[in-house]
Amino acid sequence: MSRYPKLSFNKVKTYSIKDRYSKVNIEDFAHPLHRGATLEDFLAAIPDILVGKDFREFVEHFRRAIAEQKAVIWMMGAHVIKCGINPLIIELLRRGYITHLAMNGACVIHDVEIAMWGITSEDVAAGLQDGTFGMAKETAGFINGALAENKGNDRGYGEVVGEKLLAEQAPNRELSLLAACVELGIPVSVHPALGTEIIHQHPNLDGAAFGEKSWLDFQVFAQSLTHLQEGSIVLNVGSAVIMPEVFLKALTVVRNLGYPAHGFYTAVFDMIRHYRPSENVMHRPTLSGGKGYYFVGHHELLLPLLVGLLLEDASGPPTESETTADITANLEKQIPGEGEEDTTSRAGETRAYLVPILPSGEPDTRRFPLRSRGMTTIGRQEADIAFPEDQLLSDQHASIVHNPDGYFLRDDGSVNGVYYQARGGEDVILEPGTIVRVGRQFLLLQKRAGKCTLAHYDQEGRQVNLYEIPERFILLGRSAPDIVLDPRDTLLSRRHLGIAIKEGKVILRDLNSLNGTYIKVRNPIPLKHGDRFRLGKQYFEFRLEAPPEAFPDEEPDEDRTVVLPEGVNQLAEGAGEMEVAVTFKGLGKACTLKQGENLCQAARRCGVQIDAECGNGACGSDPVRIVEGGEHLNEISPLEASTLQDLLHLKPGEYRLACMARPTGPVVVELLPEKKSPSKA
């Protein structure tokens, strides 16, 4: 017998693996790509684990920022230029996807050399041996000359160098970031450090002009940061020290002046992990809300991937393709018959026109007038509005008909169909046989044996599942609580749409999804101002000519400058915090609200995570229970009440949506446990 005592494991407590939270699920694994796959397919194919999950998440945030025209600040170091990325950044600038470009001083050197002479980047080690490193007279002469020539005016470093490149018609100016920003009117700022760039060792450097222009650009940069808000994007690409430090100082000035620069998303792209980008870009600025990301990899690989995903489909749904055309054709074979035409009355005979929508989600400058008291046809050939290059359009694809009841959109027997975009938060009645597109998924509404079902098909046309539609609203999406359509489809919002049977009718509601819900047109449908639809590769918005008070201008103001009222410092100090306490029951946390904040914003500042996806009360992702102080909350809107009651089955008043509830007095709230999403209905 052993002389050593041993611990018995007989009474060890165990549990079922089914009850355990596991970090890895086979649904998150990578999957192989098929021939002809797109970048979007690649994004969906990478593992939804660790950095793969972060990258997909950040791309979605970036796309949403573009679609919602939020501020996008792109900060960068010089190695990005030496990796040949300029053309990609310029394309983002031209599309309006970047609202401010900030760079260190070395960027200017490489940008100017590329624009003027088409070459850059010398052999430092060799030049250092004989003292010739950095002594190219043309580079220093051009940049130092631009600074000195503009000494005393109000234009900053980036602006004057960009102007000089355009004025001297630099041979390769189409590859210059500085020239592109000046030409497009997008703010560009340069943040040099004296003694760190080769132009500082030349006798023609004017120190006073250098300091003046650098200081002006710091002010320009800080002004652009005043546009930061929830959902904005800040990138730091390849700058290990200068830009992270400049960003931190400018951000604290902006917040000191009372601007709501919180809740944005930051991302660092660099070849290795550095301390300052980690702390000054990823971590510290997002403590009050938002989230920071860090992606390690070579610029010449990661940045083309990021930009490609933004350019391929920044905000809209996937364009029509031969594959999707085949799918819809096959699905329609299962439709038993056509219903009666919808002849809902539409008042008014106001003149109307179509506006093409760009991939960024912004309206084009073109306008296509529509006939009054008649029909306007759209197609590839022999149509009033024709697109001969669009092979997915039929010769006469669709038409918009105007009669005394208004304007109606009609499919004229096209091969690939016409898809009408459901408005976020509004209910749409669906008839049996209706095809719905969400992300890359297809849904077919069927009625068999008195039951309404929803058949789900993937992007290859394979049936995935068949769901029975209940009388209560069920939520569908990428990670919805009721039906997960496809967790890898990045064009799906997490909570994309809801569907239910109400008073014997099937009701669909888009939950303000990022990429929209599209309903295939079967019968003529009435159009109202702002409605959007897609056919072939074309994407249109219907507009009515009417006084501004009838249809408010939905386009953003060109001048986004925020003008502070006189005495703003005193205003920010005196009115920044309200004497209103919000207590989060069960978490031991309470905080004081800032002026105009909702519960969701207050929670983020307190370090309480509330996931409000749409932010306007349509998706229902952020319900809270009101424990005390309900009388101190703003009135519930019809949309919020409908979301609580129909989608979440909660009583309005006892519960509120955090993104919509704005306290005016003390309130105690309780977060609801997150409902897990099953993969099948």
Image (tube, rainbow, N blue to C red):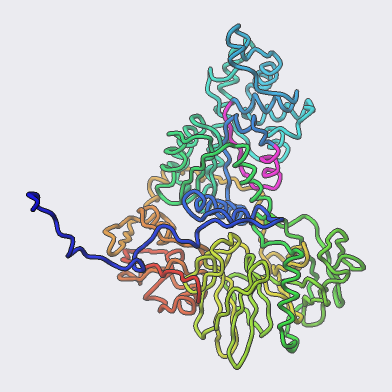
Q: Quadrant of residue 467?
A: bottom right
Residue visible at 51% across and 79% down in the picture = 473
Pick the front one: 148 or 603:
603
Q: Quadrant of residue 376?
A: bottom right
Residue visible at 59% across and 71% down in the picture = 510
Pick the front one: 470 or 33:
33
Residue 95 magenta = yes
Pick the front one: 679 or 353:
679
Outermost residue, bottom side: 449
Judge left or right: residue 558 versus residue 194.
right
Outermost residue, right side: 382
Total residue callouts: 0
Residue 337 magenta = no
Residue 613: x %, y % from top left: 50, 62
Residue 631: x %, y % from top left: 35, 72
Outermost residue, top side: 130
Q: Is residue 525 above or below residue 158?
A: below
Residue range corresponding to the magenta coloring: 87-105
Residue 192: x %, y % from top left: 55, 25
Q: Is residue 429 above or below residue 386?
A: below
Whether residue 407 can be seen here: no
Outermost residue, front side: 1
Judge left or right: residue 663 versus residue 203.
left
Q: Is residue 413 above or below residue 207?
A: below
Residue visible at 66% across and 84% down in the picture = 431
Residue 398: x %, y % from top left: 82, 73
Whether residue 654 can be seen here: yes
